[in-house]
Image (cartoon, rainbow, N blue to C red):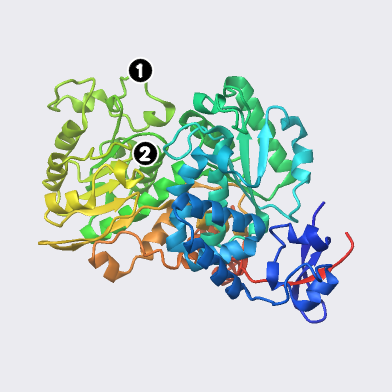
Amino acid sequence: MKLFSQKIDNLTNEEFVEVYIKGPHLMNNALLNKGAAFTASERIELGLDGLIRDKVLTIDDQVTRSYDMFLRKSDDLEKYIFLQSVLNRNETLFYNLLKAHLKEMLPIVYTPTVGQACMLMSHILRKFRGIYITEENIDRIDQIFQNVESPEIFLIVVTDGERILGLGDLGSDGMGIPVGKVNLYVSAGGLNPSGCLPITLDVGTNCERLLNDPLYLGVHKHRLRGQEYEEFIEKFVLGVKRNFPNALLQWEDFGKQNAFMLLERYQKRILSFNDDIQGTGAVVLAALYSAMKIKHSHFKDEKFVVVGVGQAGSGVCFNIYNALKEEGLTDDEIRQRIFAIDVNGLLIDTQTNLEPQMMQFAQKRSDLINWKVADKNNINLKEVVENAKATVLIGATAQPNLFSDEIIQMVAQNTERPVFFALSNPTSQSECTPESVYNNTKGKGLIATGSPFEPIVGEYGTSYSSQSNNMYIFPGIGLGALVAKAPYITYKMFLAASKRLSELVTDEELSLGKLLPEMEDIRAISAQIAIAVAKEARDSKLGRIDSDENLTKSIKNAQWDGIYRQYRFAKP
């Protein structure tokens, strides 16, 4: 049963919420609860009189009180548990608190603390959030979805828990990731939390630690695989389409093979995308557009070396490919500019162990005849940088200090302003540090990292690194696609998002070597990304037909303001 509806008073034109529950039931619903902010008249009408202490608080009062309690917590995990308790009690308060202290709380509600929380989720869980779909209940998926109490679901973030951050298979304990991603969609993108649903597909786990833990709350079986897994996913997707036909589905933290399979199979059957692949690639591409402006160069003039061809690295390669294609290059010409390296060295077309997503970026053996290498079947990073004359070096490997001083210096010899992207999190896993780039390029290197680093001040002046955070892209992609009513998301929409993000970097920031804008007003950035996506959807005849002005207005109107609205009771 739906518990509330958004309404507009026909006489006064006032927005209000029509609620179909009263008393403790109302206060126990996190979407509807206002706590001490219920007005005196609401308390009487809604059966709350005498259940709340006398003083009526504003949302600002509640944020102040909650932040004071937040500061009393002794460590980051305790802060995470506290913020989850606020979320489970009063979602409007939680998002106002998060918005007011986003920079401070972002590392708590998402990386890195959410990873620590997921490792312990069955032990620290206070209240279940979202939906858990298992092999046992998949055939009841319609009934499960009909039990959702929100009036409309327009965003689903789903995981099967196999590749949680850099932690691996955490089974249903990985639910912390969809919950955290929804937090970011609301706080950064402005989506209304009442329309957002985190889901975990609990298909078992191959983590023996969890299988041997009597407190683990998930399915105590090894993972579903093969045909059975694919049939399970098909039932899930069809269930989403039946019950939430207008929803955007974001695939999150699936294992590599399943992630690419699901993206390819469903990207045109349902409005969906994979942030680990497409979101990462789009943010990196935006930073590369900025780098080209600083270098006064074009993509076709650069040689890109990408190390690590998993989800993130493949997404980066795909996006660079699209940028080069837009500059008019053929596939053969593009191949001569993108050099992808994985565990067995440079990808080469004669290798027998190439995964499907790798094939497009494998070098032709015939093009490497004149390369000077020790082992033609395992060409290492140093040999690729030296022979390809690399000017841009990108790492997504979780191998700390992979980009050695020698490697950095070699890249710097090939270009006046070398570019280094060390994308792995946390800082301890970064392929290189901004300091090593600064020292080995005499301050000329341009750098983006997965984790935040402080500016470097030294004999070559001040050097800034930009954090390549997916939060720049995915909330705006989701918002734009939803407002545009696109049936699916295209690579051109991600391309438009990357270009717009780069355009938001000011000339002053470019002069300082910054590749991405400051994240202080991430909602405004997300709105601009959404507008670019909606325009591209319209221009490619996939989105609603409307003027730029109206699309802009619709997107800004779609961003939830986080205020308490008046409640009026009605019988369901």
Instruction: Count up the numbered dots.
Output: 2
Three-letter code, disc 1: Thr
Is residue 453 left or right of 162 when viewed as pictured? left
Give the structural element (helix, strand or loop) at label 2: helix
- Give the side of residue 230 with respect to residue 339, left or right: right
Q: Which mark is residue 352?
A: 1
Q: Residues within 10 Å of mark 2 (few under 14, many from 20)?
A: many
Q: Secondary structure at mark 1?
A: loop
- Using the image, tell me which numbered label, if any, was put on residue 461: none
Image point (51%, 47%), residue name: 490
Residue 51 placement, left or right of 428: right
Q: Residue furthest bottom?
A: 12
Name above or below for residue 331 compared with residue 179: above
Marks 2/1: CA–CA distance: 20 Å
Give the x, y percent position of residue 150. Answer: 73, 54
Residue 319 lies in quadrant: top left
Q: Residue furthest right?
A: 571
* Pair 2/1: label in front: 2
Residue 32 appears anywhere in the view:
yes
Give the residue displayed 42% in from the left and 48% down from the top.
112
Mark nearer the N terminus (2 vs 1): 2
Q: Quadrant of residue 229?
A: top right
Quadrant containing the C terminus in the rendered view: bottom right
Residue 302: x and y, percent? 23, 47
Q: Residue at x 12, y 40 (%)?
A: 406
Q: Which residue is mark 2?
A: 313
Q: Nearer the viewer, residue 50 or 324?
A: 50
Look at label 2 and name its amino acid. Answer: Gly
Q: Quick one: 249 or 57, which is closer to the camera?
A: 57
Residue visible at 32% across and 36% down in the picture: 397
